Image (cartoon, rainbow, N blue to C red):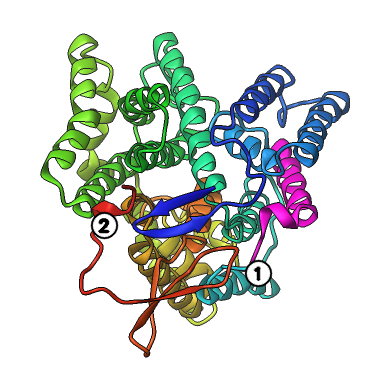
Amino acid sequence: MNSAYGGATVLEAPNAPPSIPLMEMAMGLVLVVIGIKMQAGEGASPLRTLLLFGFCAMITAYGFFRNPYAPLYCCVFIAPISKAFGTSFALMIGGALLVSLKRDICRWKWQFSLAGLAYCLWCLASLLWAGEVFTELDSWIAQALGPMLLAFLIAGLRDSAFRRNLMLMVVVACCFGTIFSFRNWHAGIGEMGSGGRFYSLTRPDTFSAWLLFGIFGAIAWLLDGGAPKWLRWFLLSSIPWQVCGLGLCGFRAAILAAGLGVIMVCLCLKHPLKMLGLVSLAALPVVGVTLLVPNLFNTVLARFGTIEADRGSARLDIWEGALKMFWDRPLAGYGLDNFKIISGRFYSRAMLPHSIYVGTLVELGVIGAVLLLLWLVTLLRKASRTPERVWVLPLITAYIFQAMFLHEFYFSCFWIAIALVEGSPQAVARVRSGTRRWLEPGRESVMEPIPRFKVRASQAFE
């Protein structure tokens, strides 16, 4: 089966999985329910944990016989809803195993950029001079190492159907997560107590980042035009639903990032009616819900009103102290995950940097900061040149903006978004002979004369 991306043909693997992974969604939902019932990761008994991992093994076995991407789909599905850390890790291992065993279907090939690899290696190398190496559940090793390896894996999968389905799994999962958010709002349950910020079963900062993924994933499917009518109606309704969930999370950075991403989509489309329809799709239902339930978004509106008073939830104070720490070891930094230790010199408790840029500068020094900036420039360059740019570019732009205020390397969704950008098909590569090279995963490149026109970004999913 072939998928058209802006005129370039991206071949799907033979025996490709179904275009809509309904079975994988059902397994992911069952896994979430089981994880909730067994309280996975929070006081779970060895027997309960063993049963949970046994179900992960069943998903992997299903993947061996039917769909090798099943563990990866389920891993992405449960992450926005549940905090089952061990379950995600087990599914990552199962997915990596099936990709290595099913090479004829998955056709994995290394596609990660050298800039990204250099930054990741520098992160790991910094453990050699770190004052302390943390392995707790809230550490970089526990939170980011697994998603980083998963990003290497996903970036190398050159199956366009897999990329589309992965986005769809996130959309469905975020819709379920928003249901929990509204339930918690109705019950008066929040991170900051009654009347505080409301969330699904995950932390609100993590869930708000996943919602960015879900919103732009739904936009990607809509702009692709290949979805059946019932799915298009679901996607249309999911965008305002997820936007409402974003408001309930109460994270200002995520809301601003979503707005920036929508602007980027409109700039890529270059079509006034589509731009107006996209903005209306997200805004009008939210306005309608606000009129029906006037106090629904009071918390987040109040937080925007106190930005100057609370100095960005004390971020400005944290960053001011970070600059003082930076000058003590400017070249190589204090080592990965050691910001929390050094911040104790200025605060009575350990603090996170709340910014990947500030955190990298202090922990990895000038060398790490330069490598990070080179990587981000590479990602933006890749995202702007791929035929998928109408959704990949807004997504990575939104995350890069949000990363100014959150340490997003702790979020698996950030790594997966990076993987999708790193593995994006590059439609046209110019060569000296006056021809262009269609880069088609899974087959030799095809040489054609370069026409005297440019393909607009709005044609990427037409």
Camera sees residue 30 = yes
Q: Pointer 2: residues within 10 angstroms few (<14), some, or many (20+)?
A: many
> What type is the residue that disc 2 sits on?
Ala
Whether residue 361 sits left or right of residue 390 in the image: it is right
Q: Nearer the viewer, residue 73 or 191?
A: 73
- Disc number placed over residue 124 in the picture, else none: 1
Residue toward you, 84 or 115: 115
Q: Residues within 10 Å of mark 1 (few under 14, many from 20)?
A: few
Badge 1 or badge 2: first in the primary sequence? 1
Q: Position of residue 362 (x, y in %)?
A: 48, 69
156 vs 435, left or right, is right
Residue sitting at 69 percent across and 25 percent down?
31
- Secondary structure beneath label 2: helix
Per the image, the residue denoted by label 2 is 457
| Quadrant of residue 281 within the rendered picture | top left
Region of the chain picked out in magenta, as a range: 86-109
Pick whichever, 421 or 149, lies toward us.
421
Question: Does the stretch in magenta take in 228?
Answer: no
